[in-house]
Image (cartoon, rainbow, N blue to C red):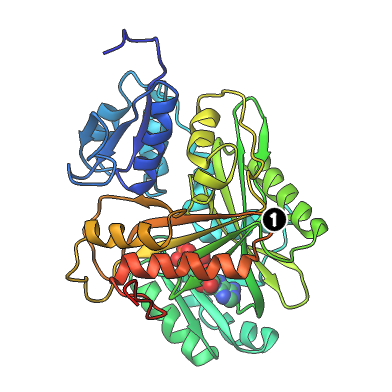
Amino acid sequence: MPPPGRYPQVAMVGGGQLARMTHQAAIALGQRLRVLAADADEPAAQVSPDVVIGSHTDLDALRRVAAGATVLTFDHEHVSGELLEKLIAEGVNVAPPPAALLHAQDKLVMRRKLAALGAPIPRFIAIEGPEDVAAVDDFAALTGGPMVIKAARGGYDGRGVSIVDDAAQARAAVADYLAAGVAVLAEERVSMRRELSALVARSPFGQGAAWPVVETVQEDGICVTVIAPAPDLSDESAAVAQHLALRLADELGVVGVLAVELFETMDGELLVNELAMRPHNSGHWTMDGAATSQFEQHLRAVLDYPLGDTSPVVPVTVMANVLGAPEPPAMTMDERLHHLFARYPDARVHLYGKDERPGRKIGHINLLGDASTASAKLRERAESAAHWLSHGEWSDGWNPHE
Ligand code: ADP
């Protein structure tokens, strides 16, 4: 062990793939990431030598992971502000601070704050109790009917989000969430061309850095593909999105990586959907496609180091998520990798050490293109590679022996 104090000690709440990949970046900086994991088999707990087993809802477990650490940060947004305030009162440096994190935990707080800051967002109403339900009818009349009903707290990867066509369906969805004790948000359903993400980082010193804006493709509410940079996005729109994300990071006092998920409407307007204050799926491409990965940048930001260069290293990078197949293939992952590398020697594979379960994010693949690469073609290859790792079947029927 190096003597204490020679290297900073970053502690991360959560032992998932984001912590695992942050640990990977910590190694290059001479560090080892300490993680709070629910059990020893979680992706980051498998690889970090410094694991605290416990729950993020348990103050004592949080104290143990934070003990002596330079900074405490997160691989998810589920730690209550109340517990974090207690840690801060005991002298723990928490990044991002709970006052910022709240905007990634509560969609209603986030929408209201963005509205107050004049950021472009979908029209919405808050439904915090039965007395507000009647407002759904007026809102439907105002916006034309199609809506998205969201639980203010507790949702992720499309859970806690209901797509509805009219006021009657909206009221039913609202009633379910209210019965579960959560406040609800009714939003107009945006007709969108596509979804984008503006990823930035901010340090306590106040330095900000933005990566190129990317296109994110979702299926069933889960991000499956990311194209960096977003194809055919004008320089002007990209700059607007980057400036907006940097401004929000500043106004909210974010420390670390901030992902601003955006909708691009049919007429080219950008609306903010969601905020995430941690490394994000839309930034996995940076591990191979940018001068500084989001994981290293998150560490630099929470440690108040100068931020790294966010330039892309190639003209286009595509990231495809590897999701657990509905039926896990009989072929081992080991054998699937052999075949994958035979067909795609340039595939950059990142596996998370997770058991395969349907729809679960178990890894991702990055493919890098050069100036002669069409991004659509690169996307096809990346999705084919990811499909193969998920299913053990080539989506185009490719046979190496033919
Ligand atoms: P989560 O917290 O699960 O990520 P989001 O608020 O990001 O929930 O919504 C999940 C997905 O639902 C979005 O990626 C988008 O595809 C769709 N969606 C959310 N809000 C709207 C909206 N107002 N209009 C149209 N689609 C939406």
Give the labeled residue for mark 1: 371
Q: Is residue 299 above or below residue 211?
A: above
Q: Residue at x 41, y 29 (%)?
A: 26
**Other residues around mark 1 within 10 Å, as few (<14) / some (14–19) / many (≥20):** few
In percent of width and height, residue 103 lies at 54, 50
Q: Nearer the viewer, residue 390 or 159?
A: 390
Q: Position of residue 285 (x, y in %)?
A: 52, 51
In the picture provided, is 241 more to the left or to the right than 351? right
Decide which of 384, 107 is in the foreground and name it: 384
Q: Position of residue 177 (x, y in %)?
A: 39, 73
Q: Nearer the viewer, residue 258 or 282?
A: 282
Classify residue 334 as left or right of residue 128: left
Q: Residue at 31% x, 7% y: name it.
A: 3
Q: Is residue 284 above or below residue 30?
A: below
- Helix, strand or loop at mark 1: loop
Where is residue 94 shown, x and y percent of the image? 45, 31
Q: Amino acid at mark 1?
A: Ala
Front-lying residue, 94 or 213: 213
**Residue 395 visible in the picture:** yes
Residue furthest right as drawn: 236
Residue 152 in sight here? no
* Residue drawn 77% across the image and 71% down it: 268
Quarter of the image with the C terminus in it: bottom left
Residue extending furthest toward the front: 402
